Amino acid sequence: MNPARTLIWSVAPTLLWGLLAAAPSAERWEAIQNLPRVAIEVTVSPNHPDLTPEEVRRRVEEALRRTQPAPVIDQASADRLHLTIGVRAYSSSDLRGFYLPLSQAYGIGPIRLTVERPAVISGVPSPVWATVWQTERQAKGPWRSSASEILELADEVIISFLADYRRAIGQ
């Protein structure tokens, strides 16, 4: 292999990273500065036997109502706060690649909170949802306690959203 080519391929990622890091970037909370109202949507996929989307939705609504400042919940709002729960059950045999006796199942997957706005794209007949803010946590514990872990992580992403929302409105 050509030593010059090897040097270029070893240095190029570092240079690219340096250019990206030096580029001016918006703070993650700036996209939610004008968010007075928000609709709430919860998606649980696959379905969890110990959690319903309605239960999680009520929890999100309660957090927004008891914490101020927060956007007003308005299901007719064009902006939406979308909580997606994608925790699946995996056997330890699936994770390990072979069977062992007394193995257990684990709940693994993302809990993602996004703020989405409709965006018009030229040539597309109807608006599409554009993510303008997001945060995510990973569930990775025993399946038997995955429902409580999901709720705890959902609380964490909501707290993160509310902290950024306070920054966005200057409080």
Image (cartoon, rainbow, N blue to C red):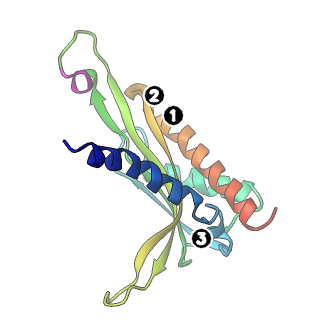
Spot the residue most to the top: 101
Question: Percent position (x, y) of residue 69?
Answer: 76, 62
Magenta part, dominant SS: helix
User: Which sits in the foreground, 15 or 165?
Assistant: 15
Kindly identify which numbered label has been placed on residue 81. Answer: none
- CA distance for labels 2 and 1: 6 Å
Q: Is residue 94 magenta?
A: yes
Do the residues under discs 3 and 1 have CB atoms within 8 angstroms?
Answer: no
Residue beneath label 1, please? 148
Q: Is residue 138 magenta?
A: no
Query: At label 1, which amino acid type do we have?
Result: Ser
Q: Secondary structure at mark 1?
A: helix
The residue range painted magenta reads: 93-97
Q: Is the C terminus in the top left, top right, bottom left or bottom right quadrant?
A: bottom right
Is the residue marked by circle 3 packed among few (<14), some (14-19), or many (20+) residues within 10 Å? Answer: many
Q: Please name the residue shown 32% across and 89% down the image.
A: 125
Kindly identify which numbered label has been placed on residue 38. Answer: 3
Q: Please name the residue shown 57% across and 64% down the image.
A: 23
Question: Percent position (x, y) of residue 169?
Answer: 76, 68
